[in-house]
Image (tube, rainbow, N blue to C red):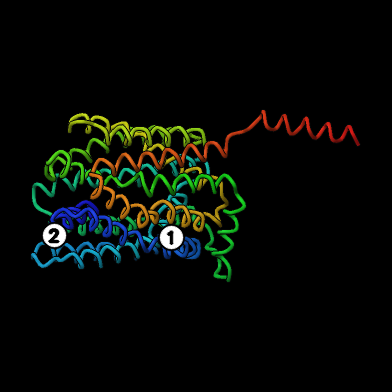
Amino acid sequence: MQRVAQDWLVLDLTHGSGAALGITTGLQFLPLLLFGLYGGVLADRYRKRRVLMVTQAVMGTLALGLGILAVTGTAQVWHVYALAFGLGLATVVDNPTRQTFAVEMVGPADLSNAIALNSAIFNMARILGPAVAGVLIAAIGTGPVFLVNAGSFGAVLLGLYLMREEELHLKAPVPRAKGQLREGLRYVRQRRDLVMVLLMVLFVAAFGMNFQMTTALMSRQVFHSGASSFGLASTALAVGALSGSLLAARRRNLRMRLLFAAATAFAVLEIATGLMPDYISFLVLLVPTGMALLTFNTAANAVMQLSVPAEMRGRVMGLYMLVFAGSSPIGSPLIGWLAEVFGARSSLIIGGVVSLVAVLGVIAVMAPRPALDAVRGARLRELLATR
């Protein structure tokens, strides 16, 4: 809700500037690009429940501040820029901590399903929030949406407070030591499979997953509609996302094959969505697009968490969240600029093309090459025979 209301407020203050919208999104995720790895170190070092209570309180306060500015009519673009950057700083620590906290709430037998469900809920919030916000903006205005969001953090904090810590599956925090950040990076660098997943997530997240911005631009500039139509577009994406999250969460094992299939389907569907001639067909195609997107995100998250040891999970997920969310400062301003130069449709089409090329490249690198291996084996046997 915060993201959509924030984007709509920027569009109102700047009379529909896609570049300003991209800058706002970039500033919100810039702290992840700068400090995201340190957030993972803190997630491994401290009790996750207590860390989350601090970060959630900070995020609620920032939402309250922006809501007061918007309601009183004193909000300016630089206010939004500053508060978006502050929200990004809190998210640096909140994201890896929240992702890995799910593991502490369940036993080992339910670990795979818990990670899938947590990832599904996390990504569903990214899509359901805009759907609700679009409707509320049309009904009560942008400012009150920020206030509603600020109030919702009270429920989050209450839920964290009421948890019985003795029933959690706590892992001993990693003691403070030098070189922990380098240790995490070195571990991931030595895992070729993790590197390939991160590369794929990097391009898809940076160029393909800008729906809060692209659907707003499509609704306003292509189909010439208002916030209510933007909310319907977000709802259509959320319907598909719900199906995708259930598809991923019901699987006990989320394999690389599902990850590749979902990423390819998402890229192709995003291109097709940008080519839709009217608003109705645009809405219809957003449903399978959301399904493929959530399946991809959930599978990528689960693959990363399930394949690493517990003492390394925070740092690995800090790197994952850096790539997943911190890539927006690179992709969002560029996509916003392309929308201004070539039109709103290009923001979806180009994003889908870049995502597809990246996914096919990773598949080509990861795919087995039996024919090449056979040739190399034959040459090796010939060499040994001559000796």
Mark 2 is surrounded, within 10 Å at the Cα level, by few (under 14), some (14 to 19) or many (20 or more) other residues, namely some
The quadrant where residue 29 appears: bottom left
Residues at circles 2 and 1 in contact by the CB criterion of under 8 Å: no
Residue at 39 percent of width and 61 percent of height: 32
Residue 352 point in image, percent of width and height: 36, 39
In the rendered image, the vertical position of residue 47 relative to residue 331, given as above or below: below
- Residue 23 badge: none
Q: Secondary structure at mark 1?
A: helix
Residue 149 point in image, percent of width and height: 21, 56
User: Mark 1 or mark 2, which is nearer the start of the sequence?
Assistant: 2
Query: Along the horizontal axis of the image, is 22 left or right of 116?
Result: left
The quadrant where residue 290 appears: top left
Residue at 47 percent of width and 62 percent of height: 37
Q: Which residue is mark 1?
A: 48
In the rendered image, the vertical position of residue 85 relative to residue 295, given as above or below: below
Query: Along the horizontal axis of the image, is 122 left or right of 154?
Result: right
Residue at 80 percent of width and 35 percent of height: 380
Residue 236 point in image, percent of width and height: 23, 35
In the image, 32 versus 280, the foreground residue is: 280
Q: Which residue is mark 2?
A: 13
Q: Amino acid at mark 2?
A: Leu
Q: CA distance from mark 2 to mark 1?
A: 38 Å
Q: Amino acid at mark 1?
A: Lys
Quarter of the image that includes the C terminus: top right
In the rendered image, the vertical position of residue 29 relative to residue 347, given as above or below: below
Q: Secondary structure at mark 2?
A: helix
Give the number of marks. 2
In the image, 140 versus 219, the foreground residue is: 219
Mark 1 is surrounded, within 10 Å at the Cα level, by few (under 14), some (14 to 19) or many (20 or more) other residues, namely many
Residue 348 point in image, percent of width and height: 30, 41
Q: Which one is closest to the eye, mark 2 or mark 1?
A: 2
Query: Along the horizontal axis of the image, is 372 left or right of 86?
Result: right
